[in-house]
Image: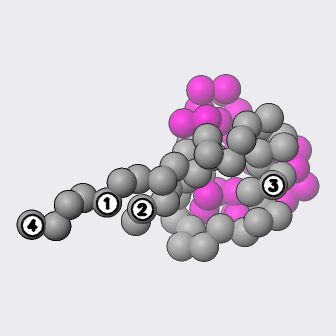
Amino acid sequence: MPVRSNLKPILDERGLTIRQVARDINYRFESVRVMYNDEYDRYNKDLLYKLCTHLSIPINELLILEKDEPVD
């Protein structure tokens, strides 16, 4: 997938847990867990906004756009 979540490395680096962040942003644990494990096919704008605001990061740190591999 060309877009992936970078939430796991961000939270791990800061020593934050999924449950703690979900509680802090008043969001469902399961939704934050899915984002943490990069299991989303579509990203919820509200969740993205809350995470970026809470973590004080731009969206391009939270979501990583990967370059497509060239096709031979």
Q: Which residue is mark 3?
A: 49
Q: Quarter of the image for the N terminus: give it.
A: bottom left
Mark 1 crowdedness (10 Å alpha carbons): few <14, some 14-19, many ≥20: few
Q: Which residue is mark 1?
A: 68
Label 2 vs label 4, nearer the camera = 4
Q: CA distance from mark 1 to mark 2?
A: 7 Å
Amino acid type at image mark 1 = Asp
| Sooner in the amino-acid sequence: mark 4 or mark 3 | 3
Is residue 49 a member of the stretch shown in magenta? no
Report helix, strand or loop for mark 2: loop
Task: Using the image as rendered, state which of residue 22 and residue 62 is in the foreground.
Answer: 62
Image-based side of 21 in relation to 68, left or right:
right
What x and y, as percent, mark residue 13? Answer: 59, 26
Q: Which residue is mark 2?
A: 2
| Sooner in the amino-acid sequence: mark 1 or mark 2 | 2
On screen, residue 5 above or below 24: below
Residue 72: assigned label: 4
For residue 14, what is the image quadrant? top right
Image marks 1 and 2: residues in contact by CB distance under 8 Å: yes
- Highlighted range, magenta: 9-35
| Sooner in the amino-acid sequence: mark 2 or mark 4 | 2
Image-based side of 24 in relation to 1, left or right:
right
What x and y, as percent, mark residue 43? Answer: 65, 67
Mark 4 crowdedness (10 Å alpha carbons): few <14, some 14-19, many ≥20: few
Q: CA distance from mark 2 to mark 4?
A: 18 Å
Amino acid type at image mark 2 = Pro
Q: Main secondary structure of the magenta part?
A: helix
